[in-house]
Amino acid sequence: EGLMFGENHARFQIRLEKLFPAYYEGDTFKGEASGITLLDSGNEVKKGVIYVNNPMAYRGYTFYQEKHGFSPLFILKDVNDRTVYGTYVGLTTLMNENKVSYQNSFNIAEQDLSINAVFYPDWIKSREGVSKTKTPYPNNPAAYLTVKKKSTTLFEGIVKMNQAVDVEKLKLSFTDVRYWTALNVKHDPGRNFIFFGFWLAIAGVSVGLLAKKETGIRT
C-alpha cells in the first residue's frame, strides 16, 4: 500500500487505491476519477471515488479530482547498449467521452535532439490509416514520435512499447509507462494544494496492472 501524501500537522494521509481514466456510474460517463482512502492517525476513516463535481470532504479539507495522465519511460542507448538517457516524461492530457489525447515535447540536450510524443494507451489504426486509441486503458501502448536534430527529422512514426528505433547511431524506445493523478486540495482558509500520485509501471501491459501502485508526492 502506498501513501499518496501526508499532511503531518493534520495527522491524516491519502492513499490512492485506483485510477479510473474513464469512470462510469451505470451508463453515465463521469470523466477521470480516483479511488482514494483517507487515513487518520493510521486508521482508515473514509474511502470513495472522486471525480469532477463529486469531491470528498474531511476535517475542513475538500479533495477534488484535478487531472490524470501517463508518463512513458523514454530510453536512449548507444551502440554498446549503454543507456545514455532515461527519464519519465509527463504527458499533457486532453480527454472527453469520444476522444483522448496524451502528448508532450521534450529535449535531450546532450544529443541535441528534440522529441514530440503523442501517446496512444490502446493503439489501433483506422481503415483510413489514422492512429487512435480504442480505450483510455493501456492495453496496447504506442506513441507517435517525431525526432529532430535541429531542423532535420531523424525519425517519424509509431513506436510500440519495448520497440527500439534507430536515431542516427542510437536506439530510442519507451520501456515502461506510469499513471499519474492530481488532486486539488482546498482548506477552509482558502489555501490550495496540488498533489500527485504515481502508479507502478505497466510491466504486464494489461488492465491487471491497476491492482499495483506506487505513490509519491510533489507540491
Image (spheres, rainbow, N blue to C red):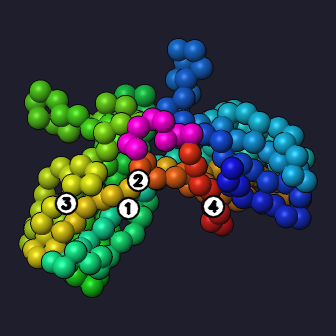
Q: Secondary structure at mark 2?
A: strand
Q: Residue at x 57, y 15 (%)?
A: 26
Q: Give the spatial CA distance, label 1 vs label 2.
A: 6 Å
Residue type (three-letter) at the residue carrying disc 2: Val
* 168 versus 216 height, above or below: below
State the image coordinates of residue 28 (x, y, percent, origin top left): 55, 18
Measured as percent of width and height from the top left, residue 128 is found at 10, 30
Mark 3 and mark 1 residues within 8 Å of each other at the beta carbon: no
Give the residue number, with chain letter if any, for mark 1. Answer: 73
Q: Residues within 10 Å of mark 1 (few under 14, many from 20)?
A: some
Give the Cα distance between marks 4 and 3.
Answer: 29 Å
- Mark closest to the chain's N terminus, 3 or 1: 1
Q: Position of residue 193 (x, y in %)?
A: 70, 59
In the image, is residue 154 above or below residue 145? below
Q: Which residues are magenta?
A: 204-211
Instruction: Report which residue position mark 3 lands on.
Output: 164
- The residue pinned by badge 2 equals 177
Q: Secondary structure at mark 4?
A: loop
Instruction: Judge whether 160 appears above or below 105 on screen.
Output: above
Which residue is denoted by mark 4 in the rendering? 216
Gap between marks 3 and 2 measured at Cα: 15 Å
Compare residues 55 and 217 and report the one nearer the observer.
Answer: 217
Q: Label 4 vs label 2: CA separation?
A: 16 Å
The amino acid type of the residue labelled 3 equals Ala
Is residue 148 at least partly visible in the picture? no
What secondary structure is found at the residue carrying circle 3?
A: loop
| Residue sitting at x 30%, y 59% | 174
Rendered residue at 10%/74% (across/down): 168
Q: Which residue lies at the image location 52% right of the left edge and 47% below the top edge?
A: 68
